[in-house]
Amino acid sequence: MEEFLGKFFGWALLALAAWLFIPRTLYFGDNIMLYSMETGFCNDYNVCDIKQLFPPLKLRVDKEKSEVVWLNQDDGQVGAWTGCTIADKENWTCSVPELRMVGGYLQSNNPSIQYPAGYVYRIYWLASFLPDLRRTKQ
């Protein structure tokens, strides 16, 4: 029984580690996974107060139409960012909204929207279930 529990917890720990540390962007052919969240105050160590975690988006570039099409992984909603100049799936610039991906990393003019690595997104998601233990001034 101890041997079974040891193997079970070992495999469970390995599965959790794989789920947490999947790379920032997953490449499925022409698709890119994008993780985003709205942040508030960030300290000197770049640890931020999270206001909202947005559902992951699956992105696909369409050079012919000059747009980046996105699919919301939670509800299946589809949309597109238009007016794009596209070099490839990892390097493009769109004017509506004003977004730019350089080398697979999304850049935006909105400082409160962050595009973290997949493992950072998952850690914040897990932490969102914990109670808020910060001390408040009285």
Image (spheres, grey):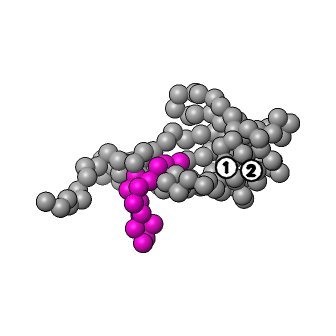
- Choose the circle earlier in sequence order: 1 or 2: 2
Position of 109 with respect to 6 (left or right) is right
Of the residues shown, which amino acid type is indicated by label 1? Leu
Judging from the image, what secondary structure is the residue with disc 2 in?
strand
Magenta residues, start to end:
36-50
At x 72% / y 59%, what residue is drawn? 103
For this rendering, which residue is in front, 41 or 5?
41
Residue 125 visible from this viewpoint? yes
Q: Position of residue 107 (x, y in %)?
A: 64, 56
The quadrant of the rendering that contains the C terminus is bottom left
Chief SS of the magenta region: strand
Q: Can you name the residue that lies furthest to the bottom here?
A: 44
Judging from the image, what secondary structure is the residue with disc 1 in?
strand
Q: Residues within 10 Å of mark 2 (few under 14, many from 20)?
A: many
Question: Which residue is label 1 attached to?
Answer: 99
Question: Which residue is label 2 attached to?
Answer: 93
For this rendering, which residue is in front, 8 or 78?
78
Q: Position of residue 56 (x, y in %)?
A: 55, 41
Q: Position of residue 87 (x, y in %)?
A: 83, 51
